Image (tube, helix red, strand yellow):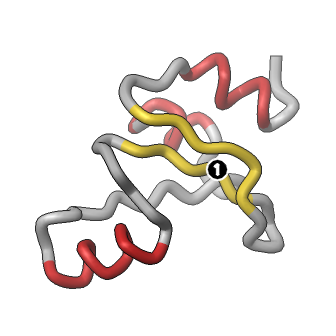
Amino acid sequence: MDGIEQEFEGRLSVIHIDVLDPVGKQVGRHFEFKYTPTFILFDSEGEELWRTVGAINPDDVRQSLGEK
């Protein structure tokens, strides 16, 4: 995700949440995290576009963002 974050700097925000931290636990419950890592992509309006659990393929992220 660090590479994706750098590649799309200014166009994409990556937020890392520690689900062992008290605040992270609340966020995890709110977004119904069941496993880690969980990746959720939101649009600019805050609507969830997709989520996945486990390793993420950077090409899937690029495709979701309309990149090649």
> Camera-side residue: 23 or 29?
29
> Camera-side residue: 22 or 60?
22
Where 27 falls versus 16 (above or below)?
below
Q: Secondary structure at mark 1?
A: strand
- Residue at 22% in and 64% down: 19
- Residue at 24% in and 74% down: 25
Image quarter in which the C terminus is found: top right
In this rendering, position of residue 10 left or right of residue 23: right
Where 15 falls versus 52 (above or below)?
below
Q: Amino acid at mark 1?
A: Leu
- Residue at 45% in and 30% down: 3
- Residue at 82% in and 73% down: 45
Q: Residue furthest right?
A: 66
At label 1, counting other C-alpha atoms closer than 10 Å, the crowd grade (few under 14, some 14-19, many 20 or more) is some
Q: Picture quarter containing residue 1? A: top left
In this rendering, position of residue 1 left or right of residue 11: left
Q: Position of residue 21 (x, y in %)?
A: 14, 74
Count numbered badges in the picture. Answer: 1
Q: Picture quarter containing residue 37? A: top left
Where 33 falls versus 63 (above or below)?
below
Q: Position of residue 14 (x, y in %)?
A: 49, 55
Q: Picture quarter containing residue 35? A: top left
**Residue under label 1:** 41
Q: Position of residue 15 (x, y in %)?
A: 43, 61
In this rendering, position of residue 27 left or right of residue 47: left
